[in-house]
Image (cartoon, rainbow, N blue to C red):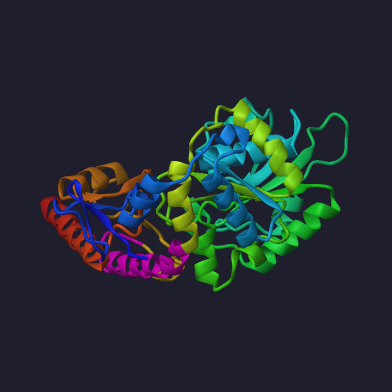
Amino acid sequence: MTYTVAKGNQLTDPDHVTPIDGTVDLRSDTVTRPSEEMRRAMAAAEVGDDVYGEDPTVNRLQKRAAEIFGKEAALFVPTGCMGNLIAIKIWTHHGNEVVCEDRSHVNLYELASMSAIAGCMPRAVRGGDDGILTWKQIESSIRPKIYYDSQTALVCLENTSNMAGGTVYPTARVDEIGDRAHVLGLKVHLDGARIFNAATSLGDNVANMTKKVDSVMFCLSKGLGAPVGSMIVASREFIERARVYRKMFGGGMRQVGIVAAAGLLALEHSPSRLHEDHANARRLAEGVAKIPGLKIDPASVKTNIVIFDCGASGMNAVELCDALHERGILAQDTAINSVRMVTHWNVNRAGIDRAIQELMALVQKKKGQVA
């Protein structure tokens, strides 16, 4: 597959070139642009009414996703947030609790939808520095079977763990959690927005990594590079119920094969190049670690997410990101002294080196002003 990127307002081949205006966008892997091949596939896509189940391109995408994950069926949804909410709604009843890591996306960044819409309470558990929960931590948060206690119904894991720096659940850990949760009658949902990054890091395949979980959501529109869309994979019965909730939540789309065509290409071809993003993330982390005033352990970077501490730089995270923006480097503040940068297919090695250079120059300038 030929990968192309935005260069100004034009597309160019093929080496993930930094945009012509010099901007290096590391805010997230959600900013990826579709390749020229994706655009051609979208223009030529065979379509139908997906609410009636008649869009052949969507149907092919769903079938292929289910095959890759070793599940019975799959459903295309507009967003990962909707996919997670649908799973929570199916596996719980109003008044139930959902065990999740306290930095997880379902707890922090989905507008409390599990409470507002699914009627559940998050039972947020602090994992280790790596954001990876153990069964012991989960077990200690499960409610006793007493009628006046809200009951635990679901365990929600996130792989990779975004706000812990793109860390990865070992497959054996997920298997243990799945087995032990099922013994207690609990379901396990995996927010696998970046599950293919996790698979690349582990050298494993997603079917093996998710065999003990009951449902998985994964994104087509992050590291895989599609312009929009996520998938839910699970049992056939689950997916039939999911289709109902997708419609209820406003996610029933019509001739959506136009975007599903890009998702098919992303699913088939993009996982094989994610190691490039991981290598760029490690290079970025190693460069950041050499800048006085910034703190990160490069060994902690396992995938494409780099989170570093800027507390000793003389700037807080907002100030640092604003100053970087003026230099054409886009990053995201995640806490008062925490900055996140995410590598993806639209930033090449030259872009990474440019980001390191601008960070170095900015921090040195600030320290010179303070001195």
Q: Is residue 339 visible?
A: no
Query: Where residue 260 sits in the image (x, y, percent)?
Result: 48, 46
Residue at image location 67% in from the left, 30% down from the top: 118
Name the main secondary structure of what is drawn in magenta. helix
Query: Where residue 325 sits in the image (x, y, percent)?
Result: 20, 46
What span is in magenta?
269-295
Q: Residue furthest bottom?
A: 203
Given residues 129 and 282, the one toward you in this image is 282
Given residues 24 and 80, the one toward you in this image is 80
Query: Where residue 269 sits in the image (x, y, percent)?
Result: 45, 64
Q: Is residue 27 visible?
A: yes
Given residues 182 and 286, the one toward you in this image is 182
Residue at image location 34% in from the left, 49% down from the top: 39
Query: Where residue 3 sits in the image (x, y, percent)?
Result: 32, 62
Q: Is residue 85 magenta?
A: no
Please, is residue 180 above or below residue 79 in the view? below
State which quarter of the image contains the N terminus.
bottom left
Residue at image location 68% in from the left, 28% down from the top: 119
Residue 68 placement, left or right of 362: right
Q: Residue furthest right?
A: 146
Residue 203 placement, left or right of 44: right
Given residues 316 and 76, the one toward you in this image is 76
